[in-house]
Image: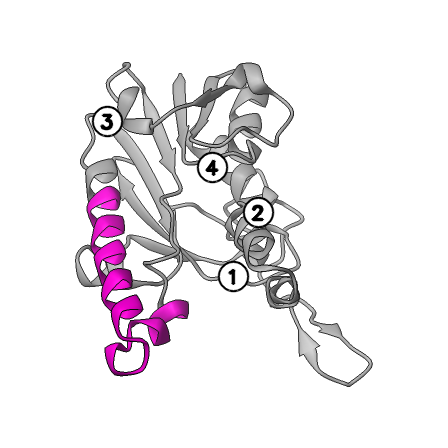
């Protein structure tokens, strides 16, 4: 299959599809960090959206869509900054819908719980620990002509060792418990955003195994 991984610079999903023998390419306006630039298209995804792709896995930017940033839309508190953020949120919604309505038969878009749910409901909600990663980060999937990802031990042929038990938290000296996706909040904003946007390996493998 010819596979497009839209808005991905890490190449985590791209490499999993490549391992299954598919012609997969990541696409992003940034350089890739996955060490396979020959599999990366540095361009606006809509410039290549009509290039006869069989399936697209997309990761639309969630900075202005996630409920995590809802406090920044308070106009009384943040004034013009909140107004500008509302404009950016609408742009993000338009981008998401344009990507989902692109002329590709099979599509999956992923995003955290956010404002896009007010426009189009997701088909499935998953957690990294469903697929073997010791972490929790609620991830929503919007699917077109693709089945939901499976992770039940009795039915999943690819993840026989996977446990759907909740991950064990990291316990700090002060006694507080945090998960990995919580601990990376201590980094600078740009690094934190980049780390939190990466797809967990177990989910990437499930996508390649079950949809490839």
Q: Identify residue for label 4.
A: 207
Q: Decide if residue 147 is in sight here.
A: no
Q: Identify residue for label 2.
A: 200
Q: Identify residue for label 3.
A: 105
Q: Earlier in the sequence, mark 1 or mark 3?
A: 3
164 inside magenta stretch: no
Query: Is residue 99 placed above or below 103 in the rendered structure?
Result: below
Q: Identify residue for label 1.
A: 137
Q: Residue pushed farthest right?
A: 173
State which quarter of the image contains the N terminus: top left
What is the spatial separation of the Cα atoms under label 4 and label 2, in whole angstroms?
11 Å
Q: Residue at x 65, y 61 (%)?
A: 187
Q: Which residues are magenta?
A: 68-96
Of residue 154 and residue 92, the one placed in the foreground of this image is: 92
On the image, the x and y values in percent for residue 65 come to 32, 59
Q: Decide if residue 117 is in sight here.
A: yes
What is the spatial separation of the Cα atoms under label 1 and label 2, in whole angstroms?
10 Å
Query: Is residue 82 placed above or below 35 in the rendered structure?
Result: below
């Amino acid at each position: 299959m010819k596979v497009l991984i839209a808005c991905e610079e890490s190449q985590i999903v791209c490499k999993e599809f490549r391992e299954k023998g598919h012609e997969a390419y990541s696409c992003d306006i940034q350089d890739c960090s996955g060490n396979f630039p020959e599999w990366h298209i540095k361009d606006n995804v809509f410039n290549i959206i009509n290039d006869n792709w069989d399936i697209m896995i997309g990761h639309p930017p969630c900075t202005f869509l996630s409920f995590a940033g809802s406090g920044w839309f308070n106009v009384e508190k943040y004034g013009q900054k909140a107004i500008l953020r509302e404009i950016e949120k609408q742009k993000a919604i338009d981008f998401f819908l344009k990507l989902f309505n692109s002329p590709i038969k099979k599509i999956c878009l992923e995003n955290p719980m956010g404002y896009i749910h007010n426009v189009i409901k997701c088909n499935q909600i998953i957690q990294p620990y469903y697929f073997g990663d010791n972490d929790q980060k609620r991830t929503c999937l919007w699917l077109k002509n693709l089945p939901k990802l499976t992770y039940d031990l009795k039915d999943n042929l690819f993840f026989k060792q996977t446990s759907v038990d909740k991950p064990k938290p990291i316990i700090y000296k002060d006694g507080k418990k945090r998960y990995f996706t919580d601990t990376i909040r201590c980094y600078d904003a740009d690094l934190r955003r980049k780390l939190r946007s990466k797809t967990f390996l177990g989910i990437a493998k499930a996508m390649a195994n079950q949809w490839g």
